[in-house]
Image: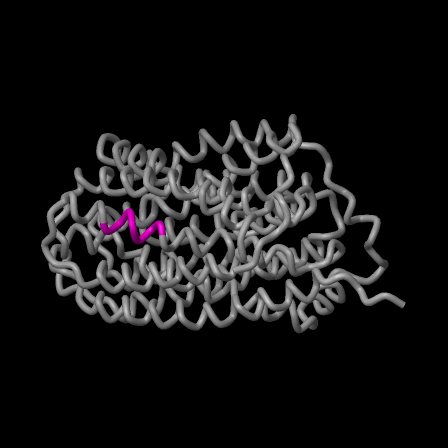
């Protein structure tokens, strides 16, 4: 285990930026996360199969991946604040379309629109983090950004499910639109222009910039590690609520409680993991989280009828393992690209992550089956073994990323 230098304190503007990016990520993550607990409602409302619902989930991922690739060549040629405003505005508009969808195909189209804009936002946010924060600050920043994931569970998902119960599933997306408009106002009025990377740009075309970014071997290892990191979540999440309702015996009214307590546990662990990520070897921490995640995923996917309190405990420990992987892995990956390539790298990285997740959701839909709308899901245990294998593969790739970063941070030899 390697001891790192003492973490730097945040400036007042850095703290403000963390707040803005965390709330921004909250809306983007909630837009995707709320689809899983609404899965059982949507499958029954539109009379669709798990395979069709898998396409609803993956349509966002594929469109997000395509837009990220298209935007990668331009990502380092403009003020990052302006790019963020453009794509976040489109994301809000796409979510509004989801709220007013009244058929399966309209929802499918709305998810594609949302993904075209939402898929780039995470990449731009990570590029901003890498531009504004030092390496030994980023673990804590990633801890706060991952708390957006947690907040979506503690607040967003339970409130969204409650509104869906009262006024229909459309109201959950309207909630996201309302919060998004407030966050957009803060981005426009409080965030400073981010243009330091523009001084390093050459006259090469966006396509050539994209190609040169992909051509770098170390970057490709980072891309592959991030893609595998996303596969497990995309495989398990789409059918999480349907599994809990139909296999574990949790009612629709109890679902918000499961997500809420899981999120509360994550709120406790996230700042701790972020601080540990800045103080100890990031790969060592990632390995501990991976081991815990594998154990809990196998237990989770084999559950039958289970008491509510035990389901909550298992979910809490499972998400501790998952989040303990995400924070150090993202802190490592954001440190790979040079300043002049950061926007392109993050866009490509996010695109491959989304597309890998889309493929994972489709594969999960092919593995999992259901005889009727109220019958238990079949082969969910097999899905757990597949995800465990993916996590082991990801462990090797993140180790390669860690080695690359350590070599990069070594001082140059004396002449």
Q: Residue at 60%, 61% (x, y): give it.
A: 348
Whether residue 316 appears in magenta in the rendering, the answer is yes
Left or right: residue 258 versus residue 250 is right
Q: Residue at x 58, y 54 (%)?
A: 3
Quarter of the image with the C terminus is bottom right
Residue 115 placement (x, y as % from top left): 49, 51
Magenta stretch, overall SS: helix
Residue 123 location (% of width, % of height): 59, 51
Q: Position of residue 64 (x, y in %)?
A: 52, 56
For residue 281, above or below residue 208: above
Q: Is residue 139 left or right of residue 320?
A: right
Is residue 51 shown above or below 88? below
Q: Quadrant of residue 266?
A: top left
The residues colored magenta run 314-320
Instruction: Identify the residue shown where x is 57% and y is 32%.
Output: 184
Foreground pick, 25 / 384: 384
Q: Is residue 181 magenta?
A: no
Expressed as whole percent of the image width and height from the top left, the position of residue 191 reads 66, 32
Residue lying furthest right in this view?
415
Q: Is residue 174 above or below residue 389?
A: above
Q: Is residue 124 visible?
A: yes
């Amino acid at each position: 285990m390697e001891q790192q230098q003492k973490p730097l304190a945040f400036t007042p503007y850095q703290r403000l930026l963390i707040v803005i990016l965390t709330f921004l990520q909250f809306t983007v993550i909630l837009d995707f996360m709320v689809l899983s607990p609404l899965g059982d409602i949507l499958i029954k409302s539109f009379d669709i199969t798990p395979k069709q619902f898998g396409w609803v989930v993956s349509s966002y991922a594929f469109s997000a991946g395509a837009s990220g690739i298209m935007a990668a060549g331009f990502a380092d040629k403009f003020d990052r604040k302006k790019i963020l405003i453009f794509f976040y505005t489109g994301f809000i508009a796409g979510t509004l379309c989801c709220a007013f969808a009244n058929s399966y195909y309209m929802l499918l189209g709305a998810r594609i629109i949302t993904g075209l804009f939402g898929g780039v936002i995470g990449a731009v946010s990570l590029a901003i983090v890498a531009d504004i924060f030092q390496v030994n600050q980023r673990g804590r920043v990633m801890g706060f950004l991952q708390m957006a994931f947690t907040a979506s569970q503690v607040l967003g998902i339970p409130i969204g499910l409650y509104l869906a119960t009262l006024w229909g599933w459309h109201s959950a997306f309207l909630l996201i639109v309302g919060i998004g408009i407030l966050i957009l106002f803060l981005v426009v009025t409080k965030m400073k222009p981010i243009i330091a990377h523009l001084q390093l740009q050459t006259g090469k075309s966006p396509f050539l910039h994209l190609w040169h970014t992909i051509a770098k071997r170390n970057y490709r290892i980072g891309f592959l590690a991030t893609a595998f990191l996303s596969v497990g979540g995309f495989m398990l999440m789409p059918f999480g609520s349907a599994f809990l309702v139909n296999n574990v015996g949790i009612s629709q009214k109890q679902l918000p409680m499961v997500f809420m307590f899981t999120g509360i546990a994550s709120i406790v662990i996230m700042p701790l993991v972020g601080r540990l990520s800045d103080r100890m070897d990031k790969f060592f921490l990632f390995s501990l989280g991976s081991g815990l995640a594998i154990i809990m995923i196998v237990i989770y996917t084999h559950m039958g009828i289970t008491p509510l309190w035990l389901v909550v405990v298992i979910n809490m420990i499972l998400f501790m393992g998952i989040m303990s992987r995400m924070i150090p892995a993202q802190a490592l990956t954001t440190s790979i690209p040079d300043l002049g390539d950061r926007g392109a790298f993050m866009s490509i990285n996010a695109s491959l992550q989304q597309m890998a997740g889309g493929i994972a959701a489709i594969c999960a839909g092919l593995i999992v089956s259901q005889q009727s709308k109220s019958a238990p899901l079949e082969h969910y245990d097999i899905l757990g073994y597949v995800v465990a294998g993916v996590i082991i593969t990801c462990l090797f790739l993140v180790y390669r990323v860690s080695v690359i970063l350590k070599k990069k941070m070594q001082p140059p030899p004396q002449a």
